[in-house]
Image (cartoon, grey):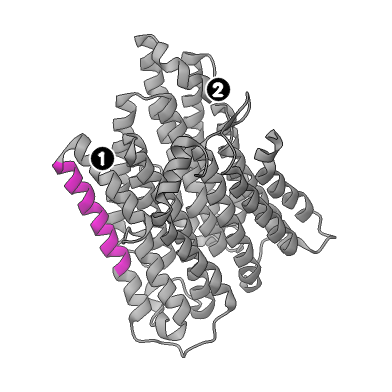
Amino acid sequence: MEYIYLLPIFFSGLGSLLCILPFLKFEEDISVIVAFGALFSSIYILYLPNFTTDFFYIDGLSKIFLVMTSTVYVAAVIFSIYYIEHIQNKLFQSHFYFFLLNTFVLTMLFTVILNNLGVVWVAVEATTVTSALLISTENDEATIEATWRYVIIVSAGLIISLIAIIFIYSSFQTLSFADLLKLYPKLSPSLERITYFGGVLGIIGFGTKAGIFPMHTWLPDAHGKAPSPISAVFSAVLLPVALFAIERILQAIPNDGVKVFAFTLGLLSIALAAFMSFNQVYYKRMFAYSSIDNMGIALIGLSLGGYAFVGSVLIILAHAFAKSATFFLTGNVLINYESWKIDDVKGISKTLPATGYSLFFGSLAVTGTPPFGTFLGELLILIAIFNTYGIVITLLTGFLLAAAFIGINFQTLRMVFSEPILEKRKENLIVIVPIISLLLALSVTFASPFIYNILFNGVWK
């Protein structure tokens, strides 16, 4: 029975093994099959009870992350089949691309089911290797530079998180998450101070991978230069998986000082995204800053706990589906307009109607517009901020969220509804993939009672 919980990992791992063999020549078909296998098995796990061993810890949050990751996995594989045909100067052959994509997803699926913070650190570090190579798929100087910047900054962040793990182990004498939950109330005051430093460093270190201020600088470059399907996986899954590691630390170390520190970094991340969204030249970088905005408000919700924690999960889920759709659509825009610049893209709604209108709704979804799940999540978090920190901080947070909303959607409106510079073109059926993803982002709101049950009861009811 316990092996059923490992099926998503089995399928993605099988895809990696088969795609590395160049003589098979079926890497695209293999990747689609294993991605759907991971998705269906992740959905099945929703109906199973929580599962804990010495090595694995699978609770409601783990199950939601498995489904979210597998869903984006399916969409990214299907869109990649279409997109890589348009890459002129690929760094490697397509079978190696799909090997890396399957392996990248494998490391993220593995991260969210582990019962040991040390092994979680290893799994998060493993995502760096495969994802760095995927960023550099479009082989040019700017892409290679963005890849190196990503590797250097996130590696520095993960060194910080490794130091955090050492602090945590020195206090608890274990890294088992299940044991950490039981031991914290028994710590002496001196050991509590050590765990405080471990918690703070863990938030900074894993926050680097999540795009949290101040170690966020790699994110706009990597998103701006990576192929659109890879940008989708980065924003939709990699950033939340890093937040998942932070949530495990916050659960293990429920220290008020650590929570305030997490709240502060989340608020600064929103402020950064709000400011930077107004002066972007490239549309993919603009949407990258919107990811920082979403991860910032989600981190605030994680720091507050309770119904704000539910709000964070709703944001993470809705953002995953909507942002992956948005990055898929930017890939379609690039193929047709042959430019990353906002000023070079006009009248998408008339040139590529399905892409244009979907991009418009995708932009609304990632900036917290009702009835998308991001709105409900932000509402729950703002209520929790008011109850915890009062009206001033609540108004400040709401103002920053509104500023980011205006900055991103104003630029998107310019691209979508301005006078067209190209004649109307026939769209590829691949546009169905982001449209389905947007519908999933919308469905998060209506599925919120079921998500609540999974989080707190462990099973789908």
The amino acid type of the residue labelled 2 equals Ser
Asked whether residue 156 is in view, the answer is no
Q: Quadrant of residue 72?
A: bottom right
- Left or right side of 246 for 3: right
- Left or right side of 279 for 72: right
Asked whether residue 15 is in view, the answer is yes
Residue 422 is one of the magenta-drawn residues = no
- Left or right side of 44 for 358: left
The amino acid type of the residue labelled 1 equals Ala
Residue closest to the far right: 23
- Left or right side of 359 for 71: right
Q: Where 403 falls versus 268 (above or below)?
A: below
Residue at left offset 43%, top offset 35%: 247
Q: Find numbered disc 2 in the image and state the secondary structure of the residue it sits on.
A: loop
Q: Find numbered disc 1 in the image and state the secondary structure of the residue it sits on.
A: helix
Q: Position of residue 328 (x, y in %)?
A: 52, 66
Residue at left offset 44%, top offset 25%: 252
Magenta region, main secondary structure: helix
Residue receiving disc 2? 176
Question: Which residue is at the front of the view, 279 or 325?
Answer: 325
Give me the disc on residue 327. Answer: none
Inter-mark Cα distance, 2 to 1: 30 Å
Q: Quadrant of the N terminus?
A: top right
First in sequence: mark 2 vs mark 1: 2
Select label 2 or label 1 by which is in front: 1
Q: Position of residue 125 (x, y in %)?
A: 57, 38
Count of marks placed on residues:
2
Residues drawn in magenta? 391-409
Q: Position of residue 299 (x, y in %)?
A: 36, 41
In contact (CB < 8 Å): disc 2 and disc 1: no
Residue at left offset 38%, top offset 8%: 188
Residue receiving disc 1? 384
